[in-house]
Amino acid sequence: MLVITRREGEEVVIGDPKNPTGVVRIVGIKGDRVRIAFEFPRDIQVHRREVADAIVAEPSPVIGKIALAAGAETK
């Protein structure tokens, strides 16, 4: 785990600095609250930990089941 210190308005570049995957920016600090902006491509998911844990805990939806045709053999 990388732990760094940033001030309001400062950024962290994720990935190749010439072509970054994303940028994390400290938007504001008030008391014990920090506002963070994430700038990533839309195809990269960004979730709060509690949301990510809930997604992982959800059972996978079953669209359908594959059944062998009558008389088919398994190998």
Image (spheres, rainbow, N blue to C red):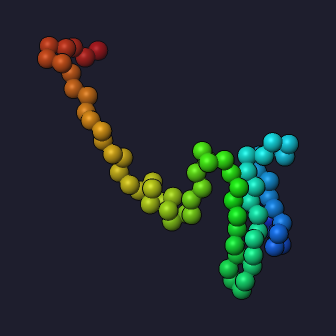
Q: Position of residue 59 (x, y in %)?
A: 35, 51
State the residue at coordinates (75%, 75%): 28
Q: Where's the C terminus, which quadrant?
A: top left
Return the x and y of residue 56 as percentages of the image width and height: 45, 54
Name of the residue lying farthest toward the left: 70
Relative vertical location of residue 68 with respect to residue 49 in this rendering, above or below:
above
Tell me what residue is drawn at x 44 percent, y 60 percent: 54
Q: Quadrant of residue 5?
A: bottom right
Q: Residue at x 81, y 62 (%)?
A: 11
Residue 30 in which image quadrant: bottom right
Residue at image position (60%, 45%) is: 43
Along the viewing direction, whichever of 50 and 9 lies nearer the viewer: 9
User: Considering depth in this image, is 30 or 3 the residue closer to the camera?
Assistant: 30
Residue 19 in view = yes
Q: Is residue 57 left or right of residue 38?
A: left
Vertical relation: 62 (above or below) 51: above
Q: The N terminus lies in which quarter of the figure?
A: bottom right
74 to the left or right of 13: left
x and y percent of residue 71 in the render? Answer: 14, 13
